[in-house]
Amino acid sequence: MSHQLINRSADLKRLQDEGYEVDVRANYLLVHSVPYVNAQKQVAFGTLVSELTLAGDVAVRPSTHVIHFVGSHPCTKDGAPIIQIAHASATQQLAEKLVIQHSFSNKPPDGYADYYEKMTRYIEIISSAARALDSRVDARTFKPIESSESGSVFHYFDTASSRAGITAISAKLSPLRIAIVGLGGTGSYVLDLVAKTSAREIHLFDDDLYLQHNAFRAPGAASLDDLRRQLTKVEYLHGVYAKMRSGIVPHAVRIDEANIDLLHGFDFVFICVDRGSARRLILDALSVQGTSFVDVGMGVEMTAGGKLWAICRITAGTKGKTDHLDTRVPMADTDQDAAYTQNIQIADLNALNAAMAVIKWKKIVGVYEDTDQEHHSTYSTNFHLLTSEEKVA
């Protein structure tokens, strides 16, 4: 992907054609072998690292004038730091095998028009002292750079993570195999959020069709032609998110006693089903396996005053804690379960329920700090109340 990006971006290709050691790694633009003077008045070589703003697979105008640097702080020929560009000095891991030590700031009145202008301007500032000591040094080495592409699941670069400087944290999700059981209102929003992470595989389990009422409580906007096709939910949603990434696997089946083994071997499971007996079957199987999971639930009722009130629930289970499930999770079939298609479902509540579940998943796998380690939470609309219960002692 990096070679295609360079070839399709005139400014990146110009850098490469002029002999600069251009590399694209973890959605950052790198120029290696930039000569500079260190504090010992010696010529050294570092790497400039810039965020990379893209429109699909083409670089566009840089979104920031700030740049990172791998190496010690560049100095004048006398060994004094070049303070005019000083911005921040702290070791930070931007991505795997990409650790920077400094950031610099040099902002033209109108910003930088493209990455050629940005990178060459910083090279000029940093390298001038080195050339004063040794006129032979030049960042234009014409050295070929081996591609550092990592086989991302995405069809285009995840510049959201690189712009925020959280690529290394987001990469914690890359090895994971995820299952989502139930792709109704909440489950489809879970998919929407999980699909935008680097999780290696996302398996979808649901045998229902994607019908007109589903379009009003799922992310995105299905067309009339989409609805006329009468695809299963997993087939339709696979088609939507396969445009963005690979690794989404549809299973048009309902999990039951005959196929519960299909959930074996996942790193995490989201349970978004509507029947208590199905929920019990799945929770029991995952608890025995030691697989972590989040189960979601939502109840919406109409008050006598003609308004709605709702409760959204998320209940987590981990290898070390499942003793709360019987008291926190409804596991019996009821008349309400049988009439689920007539129950009130609201897209914003489905989205909230899904967001709470995904946030808890990210806590469990170490993306978000998890001080409370709560395994059960509810949100009530009428009191705007969020609970945090079943904490790990």
Image (cartoon, helix red, strand yellow):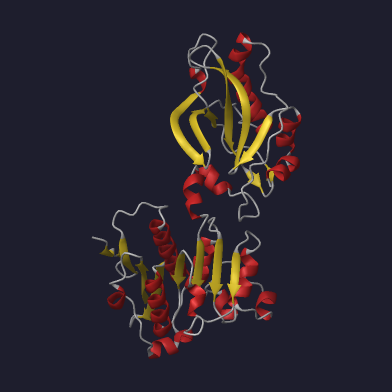
Quarter-wise, where is residue 146 in the image?
top right
Q: Is residue 111 above or below residue 308?
A: above
Q: Is residue 249 above or below residue 208?
A: above
Instruction: Answer with left or right where residue 296 lies relative to residue 238.
Output: left
Residue 384 visible in the snapshot = no
Q: Quadrant of the C terminus?
A: bottom left
Task: Give me the residue at 42% from left, 86% from top.
Answer: 337
Residue 25 visible in the snapshot = yes
Task: Give me the residue at 56% from left, 63% from top.
Answer: 201
Task: Give me the residue at 61% from left, 34% from top.
Answer: 30
Residue closest to the eye, 368 or 141: 141
Instruction: Answer with left or right where residue 120 lies relative to residue 219.
Output: right
Quarter-wise, where is residue 208 in the image?
bottom right
Q: How many marks?
A: 0
Q: Give the x, y percent position of residue 192.
A: 54, 64
Residue furthest to the left in view is 393
Q: Give the x, y percent position of residue 42.
A: 54, 13
Task: Give me the residue at 59% from left, 13% from top.
Answer: 129
Residue closest to the eye, 75 or 60: 75
Residue closest to the eye, 238 or 355: 238
Q: Give the x, y percent position of residue 73.
A: 49, 22
Q: Is residue 53 above or below residue 79?
A: below
Q: Give the x, y percent position of residue 2.
A: 68, 43
